[in-house]
Structures are given as structure tokens and as C-alpha cells.
Amino acid sequence: MISATTFKSVLLDVLAAFLALGVLIASLVVRPVNDLLPFLMATAVLYFLVGLVRGKSGPANLILKGILIDSGGAIPVIIMSLTEFAFTASGYVSLFFAVSLLATICGVETRRMWVRGRRREGSLVASLSLGLMILALVALVPRVLSRLFSQATNRPAPSFSIVALDGTVVDSSDLKGRVTVLAFWATWCQPCINELPELQKVRAAYESNPKVVFWAINTGRGGDTVEKAASFMKARRLDLPCAFDSRGAANQLGVDSLPELILLDSAGRVRMIHGGYDLSEHLATNLSSKIESLLREPG
């Protein structure tokens, strides 16, 4: 039977991690930016501090102690992901759990070294573990996100058509002979709002190249209209060629979430599907690289 002291210790472990998660969620509410890297860095620092605060108590097993503490944040994150409240992007839960658990264990070990009188070594472990963790995040997160969001493919695109905001109908056959970036978006979609300026930067680099074309296609979902799309583009000073999906192009191309990019080669084949957006991925660089690769292919 669990003693009252042990139960209180476990409860404090779980509560400390839960409060750390609350701080992280509150930061996203105050500043809703799709940028996973600083979020994971903050996760590493906060959960290290949680491990440092709660590391003195049992259980003695370092890994078990880390898992016990971390459950206070991991379980709510899993629930939010399953209910699609937050952490819905593929892989986000695994990344959060890996970073928070590792940081917690480092914090616990540092505290226990201090308790054993090894303050200098403990401080060195703290500095090295946090430093290496942050360097690893900087190096790995962009690559991980690129793999999570992008799907390479090589299949014929179905016939589709879109309607430019000026009423001009653009058919898929009109796009052949050029590398085409189709960006499906909506005015109410925050990741879309963050993604469009990056797409505009990429488009600016190819504006004088007749072999590359961009279309920002408002899906008309969630109450969007041609007028709303036009007003949005004007208010945000976005000069991407914009169209409205009044002919079902999103459904024909299999777009089921926003934002979603579809990259077509000059033969009209779908070569890449990119779903979601995160600033840490360096989308502009990756997209430009893919466009350049398609431009080098024989026509």
C-alpha cells in the first residue's frame, strides 16, 4: 500500500510537470506562432528545472523518476492530440515527449549530484546537457519537420481548374510546361497566414522565370468567399497570384487539410505534397531547392 508521503511526492512530481506544460501552452496562446524549435527549447529548459526541483525525492531509479515526473505533461499532451485540441501534427507528441523526458532526467541527475555534494560536477552536467540538447534541436528539428510535412511522389495530376480572382479560368492543361506551386489556404487558417509570406519570397525569386508559376488557391472552406480572399491578400500586401477553388480542385487533388502545397513538374505530374507549416522547417529554402531540382530535369 502506498504511504501518504509517497503519494504526496508522486502528486507533486506530476503537478510540477503539468504546471510546466501550462506555462508552455499559455505562451502559445499569448503568441500563436507556428515555430516548433523555440517551443522545444523552452520545453527543455522548463522540464530540466522541474527535474531539478523534484529530483531529490524517490524513486531512486533515475529513468523511472524521470518518467514519473514527465507523465504530468506527457499524458495531457497525448489527450490533446487524440482529441485534436492541440499537438495534432504528425510527430509532435513524440518530439515533445523525447525532449521533456530527457530534460527531466538531466535535471533529476543534476539535483542528485548536488545532494551528494558534487555541486561542481552537477553544474557541469547541467550546462553540458542543456547545451547539447539545444544544439541537437537546432540541427535536427528542421530535418525532422521536413520529413514529417513533405511527401515525395511521382504520379499524374488529375485534370482540374481554378478561377483567378479576376474571373479567368485556369485549367491544369494550361500549367503544363512549367513547374507549378499550388498553395491551398484559407483566411481563417493561422498556419496558412504564416506560410503565405514565405511563399511570396520564393515566388519573388522566380518572378522573371516563365518556367515557374505560383497559385495561392483559397479553398472557399469555412465561409471564405472571393471577396474575403481578395480583401485578405490586399490587407496583407501579398501579391501572389490568387485563385478561388469554385470548381473543386482541392477535392480532385486530395487536399484534406490546410495549408497544403502541391508541386507539379512541367509534365503535370505531382512531385511533392507538403501538408502543414512550421517556421522551423525553413520551407522557403526547401521549396526553392525542390523547384531547382525540377527545373534541371529534362523537359
Image: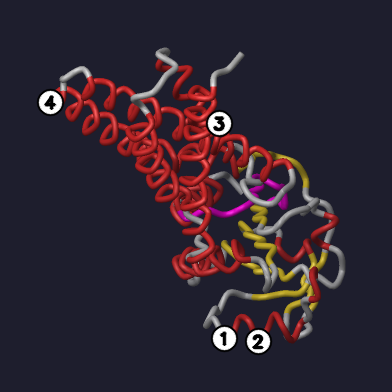
Number of the label disc, if any, that sits on residue 210:
none
Q: Which image quadrant is residue 63 in? A: top left
- The residue wearing badge 3 is 71
Residue shown at 35%/36% (left/top)?
48
Residue under label 4: 120
Q: Earlier in the sequence, mark 3 or mark 1?
A: 3
Amino acid type at circle 1 is: Ala
Question: Is residue 128 depicted above or below 142 in this figure?
Answer: above
Q: How many marks?
A: 4
In reply to whether residue 81 is colored magenta, the answer given is: no
Percent of width and height locating residue 264: 67, 52
Residue at disc 4, secondary structure: helix
Q: Earlier in the sequence, mark 4 or mark 3?
A: 3
Q: Which residue is mark 2?
A: 231
Viewport quadrant of the N terminus: top right
Q: Quadrant of residue 167?
A: bottom right
What's the magenta region?
A: 267-279
Q: Position of residue 103 (x, y in %)?
A: 38, 32
Q: CA distance from mark 2 to mark 3?
A: 46 Å
Mark 2–mark 3 CB contact (< 8 Å)? no
Secondary structure at badge 2 equals: helix
Q: CA distance from mark 1 to mark 4?
A: 56 Å
